[in-house]
């Protein structure tokens, strides 16, 4: 399948999603691709990209007490993601950056990073920091090391990939911070789409909230799935 910027963005977004193969109660085998987010507006953006790439329009599912999501059932799409992008058909805790992404051109890599940040990044408004978050099984986090290397290639400076205890899960939590002096370059060069996160990033750059917009989650740092 041709790797477009839209598909690269979706691959990055799957860092907060899943590609699964499972049997139902009758023993029938199913394949599904799911994207999770508290942001309905971002799920709508993902809907549009999925429709453009795969000609499928998944519905947004919302249940009380659970994170909203969109899901498509397709063996063909799941196998593409598994074979061409090495996404496990199941638990993805050790899913490494696909080689096809690492070997692609700058635009593909920028859209991949945008999708990853929209899924697993955030803005700490109190400390005015832009970050990537990722859980990983082990003492190092290869995907964030890849992100660091790619960003540095674009002269977007970062700190080290730091490891923290994850109080909400069994695997360590890793964080990669964008250097303050590179925040504007990150905003200008990485085509992020997540509406709420984008507004927060605009705020730390300008000190002014966009018109008719309020901070959705207060002034604290981003934590957990959103």
Image: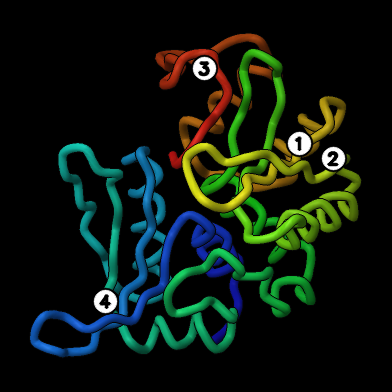
- Mark 3–mark 1 Cα distance, whole angstroms, equals 24 Å
* Mark pair 4, 3: CA separation: 38 Å
Who comes first in sequence, dot 2 or dot 3? 2
The residue wearing badge 2 is: 158
Q: Which residue is mark 4?
A: 73
Q: Earlier in the sequence, mark 2 or mark 4?
A: 4
The residue depicted at 63 percent of the width and 48 percent of the height is: 172
Tell me the tag on residue 210: 3
The crowding category of the residue bearing disc 1, from other C-alpha atoms within 10 Å (few below 14, some 14 to 19, many at least 20), is many
Q: Residue at x 91, y 46 (%)?
A: 155
Residue, disc 1: 177
- The percent coordinates of residue 24 (x first, y second) are 16, 80
Q: Is residue 4 above or below residue 208?
A: below
Relative to the observer, which residue lies in front, 119 or 26?
26
The alpha-carbon separation of the residues under discs 4 and 1 comes to 35 Å
Residue 7: horizontal and vertical position, in percent?
53, 69
State which tag comes first along the sequence, 4 or 1. Answer: 4
What element does badge 1 sit on?
strand
Which residue appears farthest toward the left when viewing the image? 26
Density class for disc 4 (Cα within 10 Å; few <14, some 14-19, many ≥20) is some
- Residue 94: x, y in percent? 61, 68
Label 3: how many residues lie within 10 Å, few (<14), some (14-19) or many (20+)? few
Q: Secondary structure at mark 3?
A: loop
């Amino acid at each position: 399948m041709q790797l477009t910027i839209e598909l690269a963005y979706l691959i990055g977004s799957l860092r907060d999603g899943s590609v699964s193969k499972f049997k139902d109660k009758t023993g029938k085998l199913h394949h599904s691709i799911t994207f999770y987010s508290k942001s309905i507006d971002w799920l709508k953006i993902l809907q549009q990209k999925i429709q453009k790439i795969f000609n499928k329009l998944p519905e947004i599912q919302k249940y009380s007490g659970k994170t909203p999501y969109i899901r498509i059932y397709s063996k063909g799409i799941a196998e593409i993601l598994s074979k061409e992008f090495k996404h496990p058909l199941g638990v993805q805790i050790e899913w490494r950056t696909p080689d096809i992404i690492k070997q692609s051109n700058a635009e593909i890599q920028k859209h991949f990073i945008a999708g990853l940040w929209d899924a697993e990044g955030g803005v700490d408004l109190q400390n005015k920091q832009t970050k990537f978050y990722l859980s990983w099984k082990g003492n190092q986090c290869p995907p964030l090391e890849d992100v660091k290397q790619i960003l540095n290639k674009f002269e977007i400076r970062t700190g080290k990939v730091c490891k923290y205890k994850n109080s909400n899960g069994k695997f360590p939590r890793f964080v990669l911070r964008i250097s303050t002096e590179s925040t504007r370059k990150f905003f200008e060069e990485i085509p992020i789409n997540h509406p709420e996160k984008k507004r927060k990033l605009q705020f730390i750059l300008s000190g002014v909230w966009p018109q008719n917009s309020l901070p959705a989650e207060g002034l604290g740092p981003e934590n957990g799935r959103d």
